[in-house]
Amino acid sequence: MSGIHTSETVMKTAMTVTRILLGVFFILSGIANYLHFRDSGGLLETLLTAKLKLWGLGFEGIGPIPAFLALPYAYLLPAVEIAAGLLFIIDRWVKWAGLLLILMLTSFIMAFGLFPAAGLLPNNESSWDKNVFLILNVWACIAWDRYRQLEVAADSRSATHMNALHK
């Protein structure tokens, strides 16, 4: 029995640390995007000039994104990163903040490609974009949050049932 509680504690700790680290990562990323917003190679220039790479693997890309889409995206992206990161840290609205992060990360994959331009493993270059792993971790945090909600609801129903039996 103690093994079950120990593994639940380990899982709870691991997911809490993951959620907080993701929150810190996105807050820092949002701050950096604001600090270097208008710099050469910064967020605004990248969105206004870069072609969408989609899957990568040498695909030349389409675009760039039209300014009427790129400008609102450029101004909102850092705010969304900071807000969602903060919500992850304080453990509020994890599902909705996580879904925003997944949409945002998916847009990064579409913009910069899933694989490097030169191929799957050129010169020991990593083959997957970090955004895939971030998406998986955000999804795990959403799933864990849902599990906790269901667990609390089940405990509440059980307590209500036990109280009804004792009356």
Image: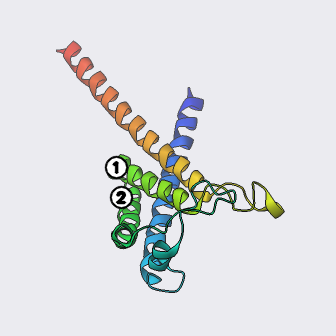
Q: Neighbour class for label 1 at 10 Å: few (<14), some, many (≥20)?
A: some
Q: Which residue is mark 2?
A: 87
Residue ID at (40%, 56%) = 88
Q: Which label was assigned to residue 96?
A: 1
Q: Residue furthest right?
A: 123
Left or right, residue 103 beside residue 126 = left
Q: Nearer the viewer, mark 2 or mark 1?
A: 1
Q: Nearer the viewer, residue 162 or 143?
A: 143
Q: Residue furthest left?
A: 167
Q: Is residue 53 above or below residue 137?
A: below
Q: Amino acid at mark 1?
A: Trp
Q: Is residue 160 above or below residue 21?
A: above
User: Do callouts 2 and 1 mark residues in contact (Cβ within 8 Å)?
Assistant: yes
Q: Quadrant of residue 37?
A: bottom left
Q: CA distance from mark 2 to mark 1?
A: 9 Å
Q: Amino acid at mark 2?
A: Leu
Q: Which label was assigned to residue 12?
A: none
